[in-house]
Image (cartoon, helix red, strand yellow):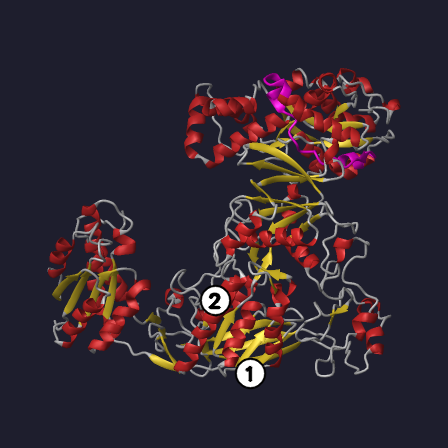
Amino acid sequence: MSERIGVYVCHCGTNIAGKVDIDEVVEFAKGLDDVTLVREYKFMCSDPGQSLIQKDIEDGLINRVVVASCSPLMHEKTFRNVCTRGGLNEYLFTMANIREQCSWVHVDVERTTDKAKDLIEAAVRRTRLQEPLTKREVPINPRTLVIGGGIAGIQAALDLADAGKNVVLVEKEPSIGGHMAKFDKTFPTLDCSACILTPKMVSVGQHENIELMSWSEVEDVGGYVGNFNVTVRKKARYVDVDLCNGCGACWEKCPGTRVPRKGNVHEKLSLGPVTSIFIPFMQAVPAIPVIDAETCIRFKNGKCGICAEVCERNAIKYDMEDELVEFEVGNIILATGFQPFDPAQIGNYGYGIFDNVLTAVEFEIMNCASGNTGGNILMADGTEPKSIGIVHCVGSRDKNYNEYCSRVCCMYALKYAHLIKEKIDAEVYDFYIDMRCFGKGYEEFYDRLLGEDVRFVRGKVAEVTEVHLEEAERGKLVVKVEDTLVGSIRRIPLDMVVLCTGLEAHETLPAVANLCNVSIGKDGFVIEKHPKLGPVATATDGVFIAGACQSPKDIPDTVAQASAASSAVLSMITREKIEIESATAEVNEDKCSGCKICNTLCPYLAIKYDEEKGVSVVNEALCKGCGTCVAGCPSNAISAKHFQNNQILAEIEGILRSSSGQAGILA
Amino acid sequence: MATKQSYIYYPGCSAEATGKPYEISARAVCEHLDIELKELADWNCCGATAYLSVEDIASMAVAARNLAIAESTGLDLITPCSACYITLSKVDHYFEDYPDIRTKINNALSAAGLEYKGGVNVRHLLYVFSEDIGMERLSGMVRADLSLRVAPYYGCQVVRPFTERDSPDVPFAMDEIISALGGDVVDYPLKTKCCSGALIGIDEKTALGLAKPLIECAVRSGADCIVTCCPLCQLNLDAYQYKINKVYGTNYHIPVLFFTQLIGLAFGIDEGRLGLNMNIVPYRPAARAKGASG
């Protein structure tokens, strides 16, 4: 046998050595077939550790490598690079995971050591049969698709565009701006949201490197890293964007309405016109209106047409239809953002039942100077409230709804308390579970509020009711709460209650994530590549994430992540090409019967049928080497490179042979 | 309907004592609707919620005995009592989900030569009316003018934690029935708040403090009567109303009916057959709107 396998056992400090008897494992490995060299080291991934392996390869002592250390997710790439540097094909290397799947999860040293031996034997047996593979390179299209035009998408698009790269920004609403465009002030500095966002929105609209597709949705994503084919549906706007100059004559005269007219102050809270032809808010980019076909009188019964009459530029086009646009990009940034939790689900908080129970977004709009209350805090009957309760954690930190903390509510609640005190000096009760003020300047803001005569009540609100038990409660909203600092149940009569609704992943995320082939966690947010070390990447190469689609975030964190995502994309673009994984599936054309079963099985749509040859063909650029087709092929005609049957069987034999005489891994 | 609707009927202890009018009216109304209530043979006390909280396995075995007997009939097990409903449902639920509890219960049952396999469909009488009989059939049977303003009081146990189709926070089954019978449902935000349950026997002051707002809210909303589907709720609101008046200096006298009594009245069934004479605060249809002056 010419195979000379080197086995390198890592202590990982005490992570492995604390539970695995390294000496015993080394002795064991020395006795395995074809193993010519066994070394142990405190940290194999460190520079000296890597050099050990590299030198042994260069000295010709070994021609195959097994590293027994941590998970391949952690360091497979590290050690593959070592092999390459030493002049060995990286596919002649195997990692035995004796940390995450061994020392970290077991207690008994003897049995843990036995399991480590089994895992190493399996790796050695497999490595012996591995074959050298060559990696291929594909070019990267320098254009990027950004999905979502909130602050995350805006920041990412601007960073890329300023670096001279082309960006397509797709936003499903008529204007970019997202939630931030609805805010009045931003915590903790209280700078005006519009003042800091609007310039960025305008830059996006004017940037020569950004193609803005508002009122549009991504319909399909095909291809692979560096070469995605994207189809976008541009929804019919019924207004010609080239002709319209956003003068506003149409929405000023429009008789249709998108909200029920009930004469209640709270029912038409809006930043822009509530007519059927509308822009969502006055700073909209593009400042081109959209017709809401569902409420437009013209679309309902064909009888109106006022907007077309008043439009001096003849920009209104009732016969406009959705348009599908196809283009190619190299990378994608998902920035679909969040949607507020719907508090109507919590019946006992009375949202939707009592007029003066508002959501955070509604209260935000009410506070915004450009909203239709002119920034005045008003009750449904138009009068000013004398007392307001602010309820934290609505739908957050609650096992009935969302278990996670929404991270922004404490701070915006404090902001509301401040704004109320500043504007109307009403009595403010702030009902919190824990005050979480973790960011820069946040604790200081809380401290400032403690001095602003706000009544902080520590306890989760049980219910908001109109049922009065005492005369003082008559006509009020009574908040029932356990005051955990006093240790009693309290009933507090108030004029208005603001529910600090938590953040949920946007409802459009599942569909978009599915198109881009990224996974969603049980909390509903995108799963990042690594929670600490890969926060902007995903398991799919070329698809990055920014903002609240990954987890609830405030504006500073969102902007930071957006810039990080765009810099990750820039790094890809600058490389110009990318190596594609070689461990792909391969069809043996002699065996293939052309049944096409694999064509439909492939989750990456990587297998196509070649009509001429009558066989199925794998597109290696799309194939992820998952092995579904291998298992599904009735003729046994497909094999997975680097995961050949004989390699996997050898690995299983290694485990089953079991050094300890009992199958430790299976136990 | 081609075949007669039949159910296994578990009256519960209240039906034989304080809840007698509930039992009488339920049987009268079901008979009127040609629904057969086959009383569960040799049934025993379900143990109610109190026993379950002090001695779990023993209390579950007590309740499961009824389930074991009902099992062979293959019919839905119906009870008019919310406490029985929640207890039997809970035991069935534990039985399904926890194999060790299942074994222990069956060990206990084997002493009586019984075994429970699981899967009896435990239901509250209210939902037989709202789901199986349906509003159309109910309103079709109405013979008497029921111009009453009714506060529907569900209590806590009938919709929490188990419910067939209703909302646990804002239930509507009884509201629908009242409307179908021609009654006016008043807005009654306390419809699922606790009446104090069995606390009345232990800590009267606290218990009356819980029951009082229920009556007060119904009176304030202009209701002529309160209608409930739970014998203990009815007892607390009806029998203790005078006590509440004494303690709080109020003057409530709002009748508290079982929903089956209301159905019977709307169907034109003779009041004597509905047990109305056994309710403590008297029901006087002629005294409409005078029923309350608290």
Apparent side of residue A488 relative to residue A313 in the rendered image (left or right): left
- Mark 2 belongs to which subunit? A
Residue ID at (68%, 49%): A425
Residue ID at (57%, 50%): A449
Of the numbered discs 1 and 2, the one sitting upstream in the chain is 1
Q: Residues within 10 Å of mark 1 (few under 14, many from 20)?
A: many
Q: Which mark is residue B130?
A: none
Q: CA distance from mark 1 to mark 2?
A: 21 Å
**What is the three-letter code of the residue carrying label 2?**
Gln
Apparent side of residue B13 relative to residue A263 in the rendered image (left or right): left
Q: Which residues are magenta?
A: B177-205
**What is the three-letter code of the residue carrying label 1?**
Asn
Residue A523 visible in rendering:
no
Residue A379 visible in rendering:
yes
Residue A547: x percent and y percent? 52, 64
Apparent side of residue A99 relative to residue A318 in the rendered image (left or right): left
Residue A500: x percent and y percent? 60, 50
Q: Residues within 10 Å of mark 2 (few under 14, many from 20)?
A: many
Q: Is residue A434 magenta?
A: no
| Res. B194 image quadrant | top right
Disc 2 designates what residue? A561
B67 above or below A480?
above
Residue A531: x percent and y percent? 41, 60
Same chain for the residues under marks 1 and 2 in the image: yes
Disc 1 designates what residue? A209
